[in-house]
Amino acid sequence: MKSRITPVCLLLLSVIAVFAQSTPEAWTGNARWDVRINDLLGKMTLEEKVGQLVQLSSQDFVTGPATSSDVMAEIRASHAGSMLNVTGAAYSRKLQTVAVKETRLGVPMIFGYDVIHGFRTVFPIPLGQAASFDMQAIEASERISANEATSAGIHWTFSPMVDIARDPRWGRMAEGSGEDTYLGIQIAKARIHGFQGDDLSKNDTMLACAKHFAAYGAAQAGRDYFTTEVSERTMREDYLPPFRACVDAGVGSFMAAFNDLNGLPASANPWLLKTILRQEWGFRGFVVSDWGSVNELKYHGVAATGKDAARVAFNAGVEMDMESKLYYPNLVTLVKEGLVSEESIRVAVGRVLAAKAKLGLLDDPFRYTDEAREKATILSPDNLEAARDLARRTFVLLQNLNGTLPVKKDAKIALVGPLADAAKDQIGCWHGRGDPKDSVTLRAAFAATFGDRLVYARGCDVRSDDTSGFADAVAAAKKADVVVAVVGESEDMSGEGHSRAELGLPGRQAQLLAELRKTGKPIAALVMCGRALTLESVLPLADSWLVLWHPGTMAGPAVVDVVTGAYSPSGKLPVTFPRSVGQIPIFYNHKNTGRPQPAGERVQYRSNYIDSPNSPLFPFGFGLSYSKFTYDNLRLSSKKLREGDAEIKVTVTLKNAGNVDADEVAQFYVRDLVGSVTRPVRELKGFQKLHLKKGEKRDVTFTLTPADLAFWRADMTYGTEPGRFEVFVGGDSDATLSGSFELLK
Ligand code: GLC
C-alpha cells in the first residue's frame, strides 16, 4: 500500500524540525557554548573550517623532522586552528592575539605541547613514575605539571602516552607505564585526572591526549616507527584497554600513531579510529595525527600523493593534521570533488571547537597568558619538593649485598661515574622546557650532605672509549669507605627515535666498575636508564644496584634521601629486566605453552634455550627494601564465586619484619587455569602501596569481582567462563603465596 504523509504528520514533523533547529547540537552539553559553536559553524566558510583542522609547530622548537612555515601568515589566513610547541605566556598571548584580532571570525587557537613528565619542574620519566606504583603521587605530579604548563600559555598536553611496551630495545619504553595492562590502566586514569581535573575551563587544567593509538610499542625488533603485527585478541586483551580507560576517564583527545598496524597505518585505520574509538567506546573528543603521520602514508605506500594521504587519513578518522600541511588546501578540494563529505568536516571542526569551548577559550582566549602567574608558578619550592618525593619513590633496589646501602653514618664516600654530575641527563628524554640549569645533580646534593667526606671523580664518559679517567676514579675509591658509582644511559639514548640493539652499560662503564672492584671497596651502582637494561654480566661488579631511571630536576636530593637511608627504596619494576637481548620480548604475563619449562633445571624438548634460562634477571614487580617484608596466611572470603555474586576477598598478613620503617607494594595476581583460549600464567589484578613501621603487621585485602575475570573468549565475545582460578599475593610477579577458588556459572 502506498504510504503517504497526512497533513497532521507533516505539521508534526515541521514542529520537530523547527525545535531541532533551535536546540543547539550538543557538542559540549553547555547550551551557551553549543550555541556559540553552532553559530561559528554556520558562519565559517569551508576553507575556514578546514583551517581549524590544521596544526602547525612553532618554528623555535620542533619535535619532529623540521619543516618550515610562515606561521603568522597562516594564522592571519585562518589556516591554523592549532599550534604546538608554543610556550610562555607572552608568546602564547602574542600568537593568540593575531588569531583573535586579525582573522575574520576571531576563533582562538588551541596550543598543544608535550608535557610528558613535567614542564619546568621535571619529574621522573614516566617509566620511573610507573615504578613507584604510587597513583596519588603520579596524579599530583600531573596536577603540578598542568599548573606550570597552563601558566605558560599551554592548553593541551600530548600525554598520557599509554603504549604497552614489552621490548626494551624500543626507546619509547621510557615514556610509558611499562609492560602491564592493569598498571597501565591505573596510571592512565591518574594522569588524565591530574591534567584535566574536574573542570577543564579552570585556568590550571589542560586537555589531555591519549597516545599513540595504537600498539606503537609492539614495533618489530624494537625499532621505532617499525611495523606492528598484533592479533585482534592481543590488541583487545593487552594494547587497547589503557586507551579505553582514557576514554572512560574523559580524555579530551587522542593521537593516532605512526606505525603500520596489521597492514593499515594507525593514522589511516578505520578499525581503530571509527569502529573501536567511536562506535565501541563512544569517544566524543577529537583525534590529532602524530607529527607528519598523515604525510607518511605516502612512505607506508597507502597514498600516492599528499592529497591522497589527506583523504585516506581524514576519512579514516584523523581530524587534525599535525605538521603534514596537507589538510589545507587538500580537504577543501576533496570536499568539492565529493571525496570527503562536508558533513564530516563540520563534525570534526565541531569537536575541535568543543575542546576550545571547554577550555574556556571561546569565553576568554587569553585566560592562560598571565605572566605574573607564570612567574609565581614555575619551579615553586612546593613543586620541587613534590619532584624530590616522587623521584625517591621510583628507585628500584635490585641487589643490596653486605648492607652496602644505606651508607654508614660517617662514611667517606667516593662518588664516581659519568652520570653523577649530569644536569641534562638526569631530566631524561622528553623533558620539554626542563632546563638543566635548574637540576640539582647528585654531585651537588652529595657535596651539600657529606661535605669533606666526599671525593668525586667522573671516571669515564657515558658512551666514549676514553679510559683516561679511570685512575682518578680508582684513586678516589681508595680514599673512601664506600664507592657510589652512577652509571647508565644518557638522556638521548632513550625516547623517540632512540632504539638500541644492545642493552648493556654503554661505553667503558663496565670496565670502570671492574677497575673499581679491584680496590676491594664496597660499591653501590646507581643506574640512570630509560628502559630495562641487561645487567647480568656487570651484576658481580657491585654489591648494590639501585635503578634511578632518569629522576628529574631533583635527582640529587632524592638519591641522597635513599643513599643515607632517610627513605627506604620502595620502587618495583614496571618492566621485566632480561638476562640478554636474546630473550626479548620477555614479560611476566606470558602464556604457558604446550611444553612449559619447569622453573630451574632445563628439561629437553621443553620451551627453553640451550644457552640461557627462561627466567629474566629480575621479574616484573621486583624491588627490594632496606627492610624485609613477609607475606603469610592467605585466606579467601569464599572458595566459590558465582556469576551473580558481588565479589571475593583475598586477604594476607603483611609484616615489616625488618628494622626500618618502609613502604611496600603488595601485588595481587590471578591465573585462569582453563579457558576456551590460552590464558596468561598470571595477571596483575591489584596492588597496594603501604607504609609499615618496623615490626608492624597488617592485613591486606584485595577484592575480585566476576568482571575482573572477563576476557576475550574463543568466539571473540568478552565475558567470563566458569572454572578454577589461582590467586597469588607477594612483592613481585614471582609471588608464591597462593590460594584458589571456583567461578561458577
Ligand atoms: C612526536 C611524537 C609525539 C609527540 C609529537 C609532538 O613525533 O611521536 O609523541 O607528541 O611528535 O611533539
Image (spheres, rainbow, N blue to C red):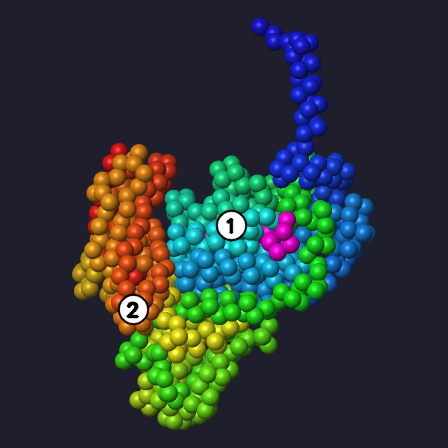
Q: Say above or below: 208 vs 348.
A: below
Identify the image quadrant of the N terminus.
top right
Q: How many C-alpha atoms fall within 10 Å of the one at disc 1: few (<14), some, or many (≥20)?
A: many
- The kind of residue on which mark 2 rests is Lys
The circle drawn on residue 694 is: 2
Residue 114 as seen in the image, left or right of residue 391: right
Identify the image quadrant of the C terminus.
top left
Q: Nearer the viewer, residue 167 or 90?
A: 90
Query: What segment carries the magenta color?
Result: 201-215
Predominant secondary structure, magenta span: loop
Residue that numbered label 1 is attached to: 213
Q: Quadrant of residue 179?
A: bottom left
Give the residue displayed 65% in from the left and 66% down from the top.
376
Give the residue displayed 43% in from the left and 51% down from the top.
185
Q: Earlier in the sequence, mark 1 or mark 2?
A: 1
Q: Nearer the viewer, residue 192 or 324?
A: 192
Q: How many C-alpha atoms fall within 10 Å of the one at disc 2: few (<14), some, or many (≥20)?
A: some
Where does the image place residue 623, in percent across and percent down from the top left?
33, 66
Secondary element at image label 1? strand
